[in-house]
Image (cartoon, helix red, strand yellow):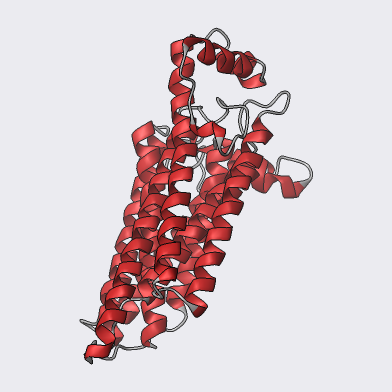
Amino acid sequence: MPLARVPQVQSLNAVRIWIYALAALVVLMVAVGGATRLTGSGLSITEWRPVTGAIPPLSEQAWLVEFEKYKQISQYELVNKGMTLSEFKFIYAWEWGHRQLGRLIGLVFFLPLVWFWARGAIKGRLALTLLGIGALGGLQGAIGWIMVASGLEPGMTAVAPIKLTLHLTVASIILACLVWVAAGLKDRSAAGPEAPAGAAPRILVGLVLFQIALGGLVAGSKAGLTYNTWPLMDGALVPPASALFAVKPWIENFVDNVVLVQFNHRLVAYLLVGFALWHAWALQRRAPGSGAAARARAVAGLALAQMVLGVVTLLLVVPLWAGLAHQVLAMAVLAMAVVHARVSTVRA
């Protein structure tokens, strides 16, 4: 490597490590968000205070004020009426922690960005790309509040499924963008040529994102708490059309009908795993021992493990540990698929 390139490569390596650290924080954010949802904590903070909300209640009187605000919403009246202040503090801690982690991610993004930019390590297209990801992160914060606000409406005891799905999907897109950029910054000039992988890696990324969105609908509608058998649903491999499209108008079945919501999630899981296994097999035949074949096997293995974990989560009726593991493993599948697609693009 020419000596003139050494400082530039070292700077890009530091930038790459920083971006991967951000990606890890996003995965942690998704995990904490999942725990917040599974513990029913998401509506415990009834106001959006991006700055002053960083400070939790510090006195008993302040806690009572927050508890009183929570008592005014339907979730308390219809689900948690009679809960103690100690129980309220538990659910408040999950939601506060989720929001605090969002603030931390903002700082970990913004401060190093300024530092790297000032030193010339980030410029041009990379700078614009990172600014775009930062803007998407800011939008995600607003989407999060819109989601919470949907659950504060009279008669609502949880957030709207479609808004929860949007929140999860945007988080996944942010993760995919971060991993795509970081994977593209690694110097692979010394690596040998690889067999072309074609469009399959990018198709896999699209399928994973689509499946995550469908998982958001399952989570938002609590479809995982019903039809807890596999591979049959209520004794049938394919539920009857009268059950799949019981809601009128028919389009609302894709969001509000737990039968169709869960069935779609199952179908796309089969499609995703089948396509990933085929892609790994095809690359192994075409270029055995190549990096592309190894990455394809990793994606297929993670996708298969994720499907197995999804079945276990369903059969156990979504215990906290399984629900969180299923959500985090989905992020791992996505990250590996993005790395495969990015490296395949760079080496094409």
Q: Residue 24, located in which quarter of the rendered image?
A: bottom left
Number of numbered labels in the structure image: 0
Q: Is residue 231 visible?
A: no
Q: Is residue 129 left or right of residue 243?
A: left
Residue 17 is left or right of residue 30, and the answer is left
Identify the residue shown where x is 58% and y is 28%.
Answer: 43
Horizontal arrangement in the rendering, residue 139 relative to residue 27 (left or right): right
Q: Position of residue 185 (x, y in %)?
A: 36, 76
Vertical placement of 48 versus 59: above or below?
below
Instruction: Name the residue rendered at 45%, 63% in the picture.
Output: 114
**Which one is in front, 240 or 163?**
163
Q: Is residue 171 visible?
A: yes
Q: Position of residue 55 (x, y in %)?
A: 48, 29
x, y percent for residue 187: 29, 81
Q: Can you name the residue that lies furthest to the right here? A: 249
- Residue for point 47% across, 61% down: 208
Q: Residue at x 34, y 49 (%)?
A: 308
Residue 115 in the image, given as x and y percentages of width and height: 40, 64
Q: Quadrant of the N terminus?
A: bottom left
**Rendered view: 275 above or below 223:** below
15, above or below 147, in the image: below
Quarter of the image with the C terminus is: bottom left
